[in-house]
Structures are given as C-alpha cells and as structure tokens.
Image: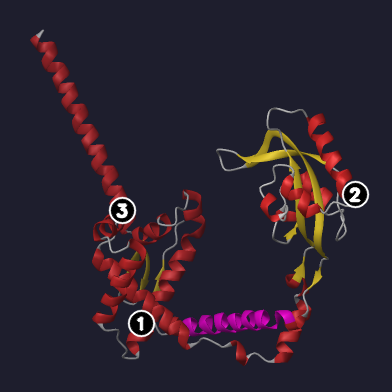
Amino acid sequence: MGTNLNFYRGVLAASCVSLLFNHCLQAEDNLVEINRVAAKVNNEIVTWGEIDRAMTSLNFTSSEKKDRASEFVDGKVDRLLSIYAFNAKGMAIPDSYIEQEYNKRLIREFNGDRRLFRDVLRSKGMSQMEYRDSIREEIIYQHMMAIRKRLKEDVSPDRVEDFYKKNEYRFRTDQKIRLKEIVFSPIADEPLSVLMQQARKVRGNIAAGDKFEDVAMKQGQSPYRENGGDWGVMTSSREIRSIEIREQAFELKEGDISQPFKVELLERKQDGSVGKSGKIAVYILKAEKVENSGIRPLNEVRDEIESLIAQEIEADAQRKWLTNVKADAYVRINLPK
C-alpha cells in the first residue's frame, strides 16, 4: 500500500512539474510576442504589445486585429516621425503643459476620480507615465499636422464647380416626407376587424370635414397624439423600418390622407435586431409635407465642397511631408507573416 501511495505521489508531482513547465513556456511565448518589435523609427521601438493594446481598447476582434494591424503600425510610425521632425526643429513642449492636459482629461473623462482613472489604465496595461507620454505624442503629432493644414478659403471657385460636376451623386437627396398618423392598436385584445371598423369610422369623419389633427389628438393610441399625430421630422424611405408604412407613405402626395391599413408592429429583440412582434395595429397617415428627390444646388453645398477639397489637399500635403521625413529617418517595419 505504501509503495503504491509513493508511486501515485510521484506521478502527481511529475504532472504538476509538467503543468508548471508548460505554463512557464506559454507565459514566455506570450512575453516574446508582446515584446516582439513591430517597427523601429531611428532609436524608437514599437512593440506588438503596444499595437495590440491600442486595438484591444477599441474592442477589436482577433480577425479585425489581423486585418488592421498594419494600419495601426503605420499610424504609430507617422507619429514617431512627427516627433522626430519636431525635435529636429529644436521645439519642445513644457512639462507643465502636459500636466495641465493630463488634469483636464482626468476631470473631463473620469470626473476627477483618480482611483477609477488608475483602474482603467491598469486594465489597459498602461502606467500613468506612459499615459503622459501618449498625451505628449498626440499633441506633437496634431501640431505638426496643423502646420500643413489648408484652409477652405484657399480653394478656387473653379475647383469647387469641377468637384461638384464630377461628384453629383454625393449630393443627391432622397425623397422625404413628413407624416401625421392616427393609430388604433388593441387595448383589450380587440381583433383586427374591430380596429379596422374604428379606423374607417374616423376616416369617414375626416372625409366629412373633421380636421385630421383634431381627430388625431382625440382618437387612437399614437405616441404623437398630443402633437396631432405629427412625426415632427422629414423622413426618407430607408428611415422607415415598417414595410407597410413605408409603402403607404410614399404613395401619398402632399396633403393626401390614406385609407386605414393594417401594420404588423416591430420590436427590438434581445440580440439587438429588429423583427416582427406578433402584434398588429391599424394606421391612417397624412402626408403633411413631401420633398422630391434630386440634387442639392451648388450654392447650398459650396461650403461643404470647399471643406472636402481642403481636406484632400491637406491629406496629400501630409503624405508628402511624411514621405520626406521618412527619407531622412531610419524606418523598419515588421509586419506579421
């Protein structure tokens, strides 16, 4: 009996040693992966641990991380190049300015709760010193980008008109409608026939001269009753989830009132999707206002186009500048195989 007990003890001990050894190997593999060099810019190193933390903070899935890792590495390289150029010009940011920004964010994002702030940093695997460094890096990058910023006032009228002609599809508007409604839904499990009977009677009163808005305030169960059934906003076809309401609404001309029609009500499911609830209602709609589809006129979108062109010029200038800075720096990127 004693011999068998010693044998089992030996087996158990060996198993524990094996498990501990494997755990250490896995931990070592993880450590190697975290510390693996993703990029080097002059004397600055970017590790995969940094890139992974940045993507994890955005709740990326494993497949998203794999697909977008190079994008995050490039972004980090651009920031380091900006810092390199910033330092080469002999510029500096006072520590007091970083501290002020640090305290502003502490108040703005964490309501001044330092314990919560430390817990969040800890969950991201970041120290307070590293957080301060990230603030400094962000400020320098934004400063260097702003130097090349182009104002929309620099964009010529000819270029605006040319952009408008080539990109008319971007300024196309959908047909929109502003609706008012009267809704009859079951209160005590009334069948569809009873709801339809109530709705037809109300529709007849409106046809006989009763004002739609007055009737809507007194009849039915619409959530917009107090506003005379008014939805209050212009909506396009794609913004109306209910197929029945969408089809009926966009058959109406401005001022038209629909006949009563059945609607299968929708609800949001536990998984976040929207589907049929199994409940029904009867609707009467009025098209209060209708805007036809078309292309927004140039004078209405000129400011928007000037901003878009300025952004394109700015992005192109930044790419050229970063390319020139990169030519003067040592840059090596190690993307995953």
Viewer-nearest of discs 3 and 1: 3
Q: CA distance from mark 2 to mark 3?
A: 65 Å
**Which residue: 36% across, 80% down?**
83
Residue reaching furthest to the top:
1
Residue 94 percent location from the top left of the image = 26, 84
Q: Main secondary structure of the magenta part?
A: helix
Q: In the rendered image of this protein, does residue 258 appear above or below residue 126? A: above
Closer to us: mark 2 or mark 3?
Answer: 2
Q: Residue furthest left?
A: 2
Question: At 36% from the left edge and 67% from the top edge, which residue is drawn?
Answer: 108
Residue beneath disc 3: 123
Quadrant where the N terminus is found in the figure: top left
In the picture, the disc for residue 142 is none
**Position of 128 relative to 261 (above/below):** below
Secondary structure under tag 3 reads helix
Quarter assignment of residue 89: bottom left
Q: Residue 219: percent from the left, percent from the top?
A: 74, 44
- Is residue 156 found inside the magenta-colored segment of the image? no
Q: Which residue is pictured at 34% across the width and 88% down the height?
A: 88
Q: Range of the magenta residues?
A: 300-324
Q: Earlier in the sequence, mark 3 or mark 1?
A: 1
Residue occupied by mark 1: 84
Q: Which residue is mark 2?
A: 207
